[in-house]
Image: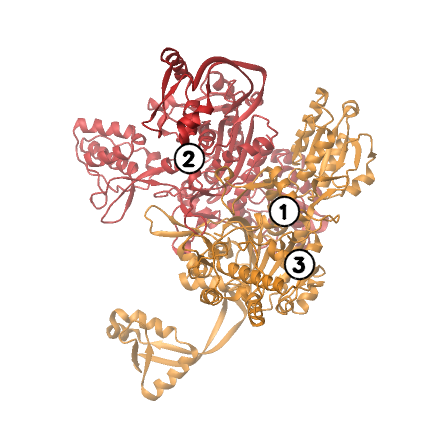
Chain colours: A red, B orange
Amino acid sequence: MATLNTKTGQVVDRSVLDSMLRRRMFYTPSFEIYGGVSGLYDYGPPGCALVTNIVDLWRRHFVLEEDMLEVDCTMLTPHDVLKTSGHVDKFADWMCKDPKTGEIFRADHLIEEVLEARLKGDKEARGQKVVVDEEKEAKKKKKVKETKAVKLDDNVVKQYEEILAQIDNYDGHELAELIAVHDIRNPTTGGNLLPPVSFNLMFQTSIGPSGNLPGYLRPETAQGQFLNFQKLLEFNQQGMPFASASIGKSFRNEISPRSGLLRVREFLMAEIEHFVDPEGGKKHPRFDEVKDVEMTFLNRAVQLSGSTKTEQMTIGKAVESGLVDNETLGYFIARIQLFLLKLGVDKKKLRFRQHMANEMAHYATDCWDAELQTSYGWIECVGCADRSAYDLTVHKNKTGAPLVVRETRAEPLRIEEWQIDLDKKKFGPRFKKDSKTVEAAVDALSQELREKLALDLDQNGKIEVDVEGVGSGKVELEKDLIKIEKRTRVENVREYTPNVIEPSFGIGRILYSVIEHVYWSRPEDAARGVLSFPPVIAPTKVLLVPLSTHPSFRPLTQRMMAKLRRMGVANRVDDSSASIGKRYARNDELGTPFGITIDFQSVKDNTFTLRDRDTTKQVRASEDEILQAVKSLVDGEETWEDIRKRLPEFTGQDVE
Amino acid sequence: MATLNTKTGQVVDRSVLDSMLRRRMFYTPSFEIYGGVSGLYDYGPPGCALVTNIVDLWRRHFVLEEDMLEVDCTMLTPHDVLKTSGHVDKFADWMCKDPKTGEIFRADHLIEEVLEARLKGDKEARGQKVVVDEEKEAKKKKKVKETKAVKLDDNVVKQYEEILAQIDNYDGHELAELIAVHDIRNPTTGGNLLPPVSFNLMFQTSIGPSGNLPGYLRPETAQGQFLNFQKLLEFNQQGMPFASASIGKSFRNEISPRSGLLRVREFLMAEIEHFVDPEGGKKHPRFDEVKDVEMTFLNRAVQLSGSTKTEQMTIGKAVESGLVDNETLGYFIARIQLFLLKLGVDKKKLRFRQHMANEMAHYATDCWDAELQTSYGWIECVGCADRSAYDLTVHKNKTGAPLVVRETRAEPLRIEEWQIDLDKKKFGPRFKKDSKTVEAAVDALSQELREKLALDLDQNGKIEVDVEGVGSGKVELEKDLIKIEKRTRVENVREYTPNVIEPSFGIGRILYSVIEHVYWSRPEDAARGVLSFPPVIAPTKVLLVPLSTHPSFRPLTQRMMAKLRRMGVANRVDDSSASIGKRYARNDELGTPFGITIDFQSVKDNTFTLRDRDTTKQVRASEDEILQAVKSLVDGEETWEDIRKRLPEFTGQDVE
């Protein structure tokens, strides 16, 4: 396990944290009474509230702040759409089956593990110290249980190291070769494996009763947004740039899920597709607002040189120096950081890592990941990809739908070009049923070809044009049928396919990483955890704690509860007979930031104490003052320090 | 089409409304540029905001108000869970295929249509007036395009009418017989159909790479809640009664979807599972708060008598008279009504209809639907079912998980019963590997059988017990192996399986029905629709309208926008060059309840006009007063009438 420290310097013990999260029902394996299904988790009440609050903040931070057009598209997606988008062919991993045991291995992971184990064995045999990359180890559900101290040839060591350096770079054929050449087998049984086959990671189903319409559960929310581009542009009254946004579940049929919430088969995503004119350097009108945000970058070149050394700079500097390609990409990267910090992410455990060329998704031309450091290592929680015009172009080409922007030019554009006139009256009698096909082939001729053909026609009185599917595949056209001339065309409307900048958030990964960042325990009670969620995302904002089960407290508790509810402040009552200290400790584990104690003094003079989770300090004031303070804390208008300065401290009760 | 009138008495023209909803992108067919997939719709920006606001209100009205335990479970569900729940066997419709054309028909719908067409033809032949049930017609995507005037025997007419009266009541075998006997064919081609086969309405898929774990997309969110019952009870510190709640997508692979948003294949549900002790009459502690709510009921007996006559009474009266079985069911029925009215449902277009015995889902013992009247007829939008202990019991029996409540009895219970002692030392040598099976079979003997066996044992010195799978299936036990005696057992803990009351909301259906209820048009501009959403669910609360594109308005607009955003009030600016009247009309169609106009007077003295969508009246006041009024209106603290009384009316601009 990678070592991760809490804010207070304790080492995060993941097994202790995990057991606390399950005990408090943040999340739990789905279908556990049926033995569970790996990669599927349910959120319990506090987890569910946390998700809702994170999504709500996301919506305010991104969607409302920038008037993004939120859409909600179906998860069921017909085959054709995902064939066009490239997911049917490319959203896959290679897997190998052991024909004897039926076990299935992800091919690249298996080769990696086996070769690493051999290199480790070699080092042991050579008497060298074995340095384990703990992060890498922690990410794996290891198939290779033990290593054997066997010395390898120097040549072989070098070869293995070269393979490992580019393990993400092999296709199925190459993986098959590696497995054969290096005799890679089932690590447990030593059995031979079948050659790798491509396993598509989408869940397949069939839509409707006929079985003729195959479909998938979407692997991302993005496609629905792209398919609606035309309507969204129309809704936006043709205004560019604009962004659409979507929050919803996506699916990925992992070969062997692991790492808890970090790699699951069904997950909540929040995705933005920002459509921008590719011309003019992709400027962003609000870039100035973020340009001074300080960030940590891990760029592509550094990684290719084998290092993970980061550098600090402002996003303004990063864009200026070309490290981040353009303002729009930079604007979103900075906004992503601001969002994550609001959630309680520890800035020291956040970096932006640029993808290397070979690891990018098939649609991306550049991609930066917001990575959060956890006990599993650095985890990609937000991707910010430049998908260029890829998606809109492929869907436009496939369907003919005009997924483009048409813009009246301020100055009409004059274009010199080779234009073709056909004598269509003569085309019919000559080509009969093939007329349309020949016309289309002629229309599709490039400017370069037209120039050349114009010369041919002039010299020979006829030309030859390739027309697939007609006659021999070549068609002869004489001077009386075709004319090719250079002319000037005036273009008043500019038509272009927008580029897409896509910030894409994995809500479950963010949620889990934030939990690790805000988790700590008090020196005086190391067994009990505390989750210091910022009030804005805390599942419950206020715990109401009557001092005892004495009946005189009940009306006050009820009144406070009703008032808080009316103010929209999520609260819970704990009127169990446990000690106040125990009740607060339970709620520290749930991350409840504030507590209101109702005691005999409250019954007499209607004053209450308000307790802060992180400092355990208390203040005492009238009902109205306490309620107003809570509201102000939850809305983020005041901090606990502000409240402590203006309301009298209370040290009366012994609550711990 | 069923006739539905707006609040102002106009007839709802569904085609006009539909085209407005698509133009304003409330929703749109999914994958339209690929030809679309029936039964799948995407929500555009206003639809999406509407869904979010409805869900948010639902969460406040139900979850927060009653401290329900919200969970979020996966949609992917393994086969075993849904086998146990009964969905694999019973969540199905019967379909017939035309082997020549490949067309697929839902069997009951087809028989219904064909017989109705023949009856209609008969009436025509007899020269009788044909009264068309418009509601019923509107619900159908009709297969029978025209009727032929053919006179039928009086006997046949009677027979047809009897079949139609109980069309929901036939199983597959009976449907096959009806098709054969009455020569029912493909209405278009006259071709013969294959016998009906059961079509399961769940989408099937396969989880993981091996293909060995079949799964489905859930048909309801309920199962995930039931499977987590034990953990939820623990989370609730063993307190009963309590409710869990879940908001999420469910799926139903309709044979032939129709009626727009009302019958779709992927839909958002919000479901509550309220767990209650079956003993003690299912009282509800907060029933008094709702007992005077006046409601419209359509009970089972009335429907069976062939009528749809409703009766009005308070829910208190309905429970008292036994019409509604118990307080808990009654409490939720009343709360459902209160929720629907908050959304803008027209009370005259709301009724609660009790299910007849044969139409209930396989798990329900009683069910009331909240039905909303629309142009498609009365539509079930919320179901409120008593699922008794069905689900917890079947999952407990299948998995052995203790999905029960254990409660210390105030008074220990003394139970007289027949107890069995086995001499286990002798069991091993005698039954060897079958020992456990025999023991289990003996343990499972009923009290009745034990009494009889005690007598046998006493008389014969031995007894015979049925043990499946051991020897001949019967095992002989002698006196030295077994003792059966009547003894008194003292039970200090009561163990019971809770009953479940389930209010289940179809958000898309509610959304569409509410739209029809709040839709109208102004007499002076009948071509333009108005959607009078209550502010709480309106997609956008305030439209900011600068009088013209004059640059002096811009800073004021920006400031207002920022302030509203900070107050959490969703707003949009329309600074297009269209007339103010046009801009307001556009936003009437989007259902934006308020508008703030920024004019030259605003630049001078920082006063603004506030316009009410429904009355088109305006008031004028200072920036702070206007913002405060908006906040108060959106939060539901004041009505427009309140505002109009306390702020000066403005009649200056001609905005229409």
Residue situated furthest bottom in the rendering: B459
Where is residue B273 shown, x and y percent of the image? 55, 57
Q: Which residue is mark 2?
A: A84
Does A419 sit left or right of B634 as displayed?
A: left
Where is residue B433 shown, x and y percent of the image? 26, 69
Camera-near label (1 vs 2) is: 2
**Can residue A560 be spotted in the picture?**
yes
Q: Amino acid at mark 2?
A: Thr
Whether residues under marks 3 and 2 lie with C-beta atoms below 8 angstroms apart, the answer is no
Camera-near label (3 vs 1) is: 3
Residue toward you, B335 or B576: B576
Camera-near label (3 vs 2) is: 2
Q: Amino acid at mark 3?
A: Arg
Whether residues under marks 1 and 2 lie with C-beta atoms below 8 angstroms apart, the answer is no
Q: Quadrant of the N terminus of chain A?
A: top left
Does B89 sit left or right of B649 as displayed?
A: left
**Is label 3 in a helix, a strand or a loop?**
strand
Give the crowd class for mark 1: few <14, some 14-19, many >=20 residues within 10 Å. some
Task: Judge if badges 1 and 2 mark residues of a common chain.
Answer: no
**Can residue A613 be spotted in the picture?**
no
Of pointers 3 and 1, the one earlier in the residue sequence: 1
- For the point 20% across and 36% down, which residue is it? A180
Q: Which residue is mark 3?
A: B351
**Is label 2 in a helix, a strand or a loop?**
helix
Q: Which residue is mark 1?
A: B57
Give the distance between the C-alpha atoms of the residues marked 3 and 1, in whole angstroms.
Answer: 21 Å
